[in-house]
Image (cartoon, rainbow, N blue to C red):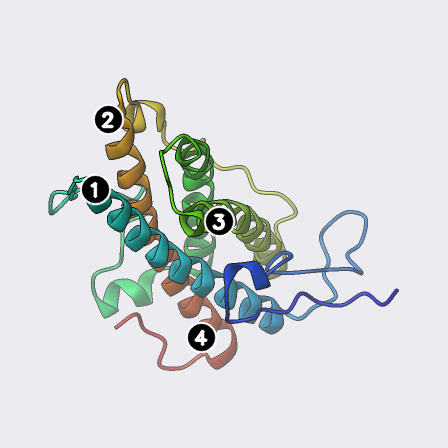
Amino acid sequence: MHKVCVAFVLCSPQAVTGSPVDCPNQDTAGTSCAISVEKLLERAVQHAELIYRVSEESKLLFCNMLISYGMNLHIPKGTMCAPKMVPVPMSKSEIQQISDKWILHSLLILAQFWIDPLVEVQASLENYENAPSALLTRSKWISTKLMSLEQGIMVLIRQILGEGSLTLEGPEETSDRFVSSNILQTVRRDYSVIYCFRKDAHKMQTFLKLLKCRQIDKENCSLF
């Protein structure tokens, strides 16, 4: 059987399988990948774009479901969603000052931060009455693909930074933030996770595009 790299298909979630990167000839130490950094970044960017797009669809499906229940939730303006340790560069000068290492570590923090809350929401949605199958499918898809993206980011860290392993501080505690004791609080928690992850999915997509520009184009790289 021929070993092939994972392809990204811009279509329905069901059509996208595998991990964002594939290193069939990786050595036993896990420090070398046969695929070029350029190809790895292309796949990671495409993967992040799909995750963000499906997260947008999930938010709309969840909101429509709430409307059918006679509910209307919103997240107050200014609500903090992202982990505090990943600030967003607000100017061109700040972007020029951040390193590729900062971008990669921030990407890994964001991916790891949302894995558990998304798995919990996926399980929670199974208990909703008449939850749309499209929402359930997308919730499961996002959880699975975020884990794949996390692995892809770790490969990029090895390839770009030459770090065989990376130990980060544990993700912020999410149990207090997303805890719920009744049905309404559960719905609010699930909406908060879906709403906030969508914002951070866009951030991951943006950071990966910036990193790709720096590694490949090397000129005129900016978030603005």
Closer mark to the observer between disc 2 and disc 4: 2
Image mark for residue 137:
3
Q: Marks 2 and 4, Cα distance to the nearest angstrom? A: 42 Å
Could you say which disc has been placed on residue 211 in the image?
Answer: none
**CB within 8 Å, label 3 to label 1:** no
Residues packed near mark 3 inside 10 Å, few (<14), some (14 to 19) or many (20 plus)? some
How far is the residue under mark 4 from the one under mark 1?
A: 28 Å
Please name the residue shown 50% across and 49% down the image. 146
Mark 2 = which residue? 185
Rate crowding at label 2 as few (under 14), some (14 to 19) or many (20 or more) other CA atoms within 10 Å. few
In the image, is residue 178 above or below residue 97? above
Sequence-wise, the earlier of marks 4 and 1 is 1
x then y, percent, for residue 110: 41, 46
Q: Which mark is residue 213?
A: 4
In front: mark 4 or mark 1?
Answer: 1
Is label 1 in a helix, a strand or a loop? loop
**Sequence order check: which comes first, mark 2 or mark 3?**
3
Mark 4 surroundings within 10 Å by alpha-carbon count, few (fewer than 14), some (14 through 19), many (20 or more): some
Question: Camera-side residue: 194 or 223?
Answer: 194
